Image (cartoon, rainbow, N blue to C red):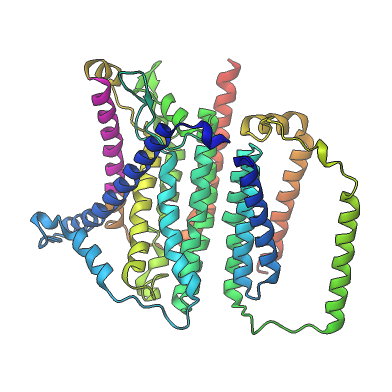
Amino acid sequence: MLLLLIGLSFIIEKVILISVILMGSLGIAMYATWAERKVAAVMQDRRGPNRAGPFGILQPLADGLKLFMKEEIIPDSSTRFLFILGPCLAMLTALMTSAVVPWGPDYVTSSGHVVALQVADINIGILFIFGVVSLGVYGVMLGGWASNNKFSLLSSIRAASQAISYELAMGISLIALLMLTSTLSLREIVGQQHGFWHDGYFTWNFFKQPIGFLVFLVCSFAELNRAPFDLPEAESELNMGYHQEYSSMKLGFYLFAEYINMFVSSAIMATLFFGGYNFPFMDQVQVAAGPLFFTIICVMVLLTKVVGFILFFMFVRWTLPRFRYDQLMRLGWKSLIPLALVNMVITGAVILWTLKK
Amino acid sequence: MGLYEILFWFLTVMALGCALGVILSRNPISSVLFLIATFFAISGHYILMNAQFLAIVNIIVYAGAIMVLFLFVIMLMNLNADTEPQKNRLIQLAGVISGGILFLVILGALRNVPVASLERTNTGIGLIKNLGKVLFTQFVLPFEISSVLFLSAMIGAIVIGRKE
């Protein structure tokens, strides 16, 4: 009934957009693995991968080929169905979030046809992201349990309790942002951050919610299982982590999902707090450049912000040592949640005060 | 049969099938997984009723948090199908009778409900804006009381779990 009303051109447009976004996130995640090794090398005064192609630029392809060619082992004592389901779920939840991110402004063709650079503008955009993130822990938990290995189980339990603890603070920091924007749609949130300067203040949400951004950033480190919160992959205590029994591309899926998650959460942080595709003097640029060129510039601006965040994730990983588990829990429950609550109360008070005036 | 009906029946069959899977499967882990699938089916029903906020909150709270804790506990206890304790016949019989009586009561209560009045109207009451307005104006007292109830439950859990 509903599907028949939607034109064929609309479906084709969306299919192309989804394919481009999927290919783009896979490609960026591939080169993020290369960049991670290069960044680590630079920070530790080494050379890093330099054999496959110039500057080791073909290294991700070689790694992928290696993972595909390796023997695939499913342990006899594992729960076979869940063992296979685990990495699939990890990959699925990693790729689902990019559906609601607006990658650029609407592009209007010369015949007046509007092309939205966002797969789905749903009116619960942020909650959708939050739901998918909260499901992301299933891949790790099921994989770790189905391996039938004590270390994998310990690791997956760590991952689950860490994810649940930090989701609370993340949610509260988002509530403060939502009170400010009074919408859940990511498209409208980006629209409110148009340009850079308006009415004597910055338009980007980072300048209105610095504490909220800080809490969100720390929580996203924990949700991504990235250092300094990579307790589920603490190889010195757990041999390897929840993916210890995995081999071949199933292991590759787990490792790869982490980089895709990093890319998508960088895109979300850029969208929520750093203006998405907006940049200073964009109105003047829009007049100077044509509509097509302007759209490309906007997408490039967003990708630049995303790459900046990814590099930040990497710098932190190779700078800070790993937390101890009780320190991690103390930070989450006793520091971040109260901080996020105070931030929420202050935001509410300021909004109430400015409304009354 | 339109798309709406197809989706409705698909979700209904999925919800009922998964709910049966919860109680029929021997392995507790697969019971939990069936329960998660049931929550997804129910969320699909909410979306069909244009209540997107309820749908996503159902997934965040139940599938994303509570079921993770269930899975957590079951994994730690390492329950298996063969370690399941065998209950004796009398208890099984009592369970069947009490369950059957409950089913009878529900059936009796629902027998006279007029089905024709359940027409689909697009009110949009489940959208977050309308829901917030209703909750914080018309039903603000019950809403606040239930939140106090949750708070007292949380404090109670902390008091019980605290080391002496």
Q: How many marks?
A: 0
Side of B77 where B155 appears, left or right: right
Side of B15 where A257 appears, left or right: left
Residue B152, given in percent of the width and then of the height, sits at 74, 52
Instruction: Work out whether B99 lies above or below B16.
Output: below
Instruction: Work out whether B151 lies above or below A267.
Output: below
Residue A46, given in percent of the width and then of the height, sits at 13, 61
Instruction: Single out the residue that lies furthest toward the front.
Output: B1
Q: Which residue is drawn at the image coordinates 40% and 44% (left, top)?
A: A98
Side of B71 where A220 appears, left or right: left
**Quadrant of the frame with the C terminus of chain A:** top right
> Is any part of residue A208 visible from this angle?
no
In this orientation, which residue lies closer to the viewer: A301 or A168? Answer: A301
Query: Which secondary structure type mostly characterizes the magenta part of the structure?
Result: helix
- Residue range corresponding to the magenta coloring: A290-312
Residue A203 sits in quarter: top left
| Magenta segment includes B27 | no
**Quadrant of the frame with the N terminus of chain A:** top right
| Magenta segment includes A306 | yes
Side of A73 where B42 appears, left or right: right
Residue B163, given in percent of the width and then of the height, sits at 65, 68
Residue A64, given in percent of the width and then of the height, sits at 25, 63
Q: Which residue is drawn at the image coordinates 87% and 66% (left, top)?
A: B100
Residue B92 sits in quarter: bottom right
Q: Which residue is drawn at the image coordinates 69% and 32% (left, top)?
A: B125
Instruction: Work out whether A155 lies above or below A60.
Output: below
> Is any part of residue B91 visible from this angle?
yes
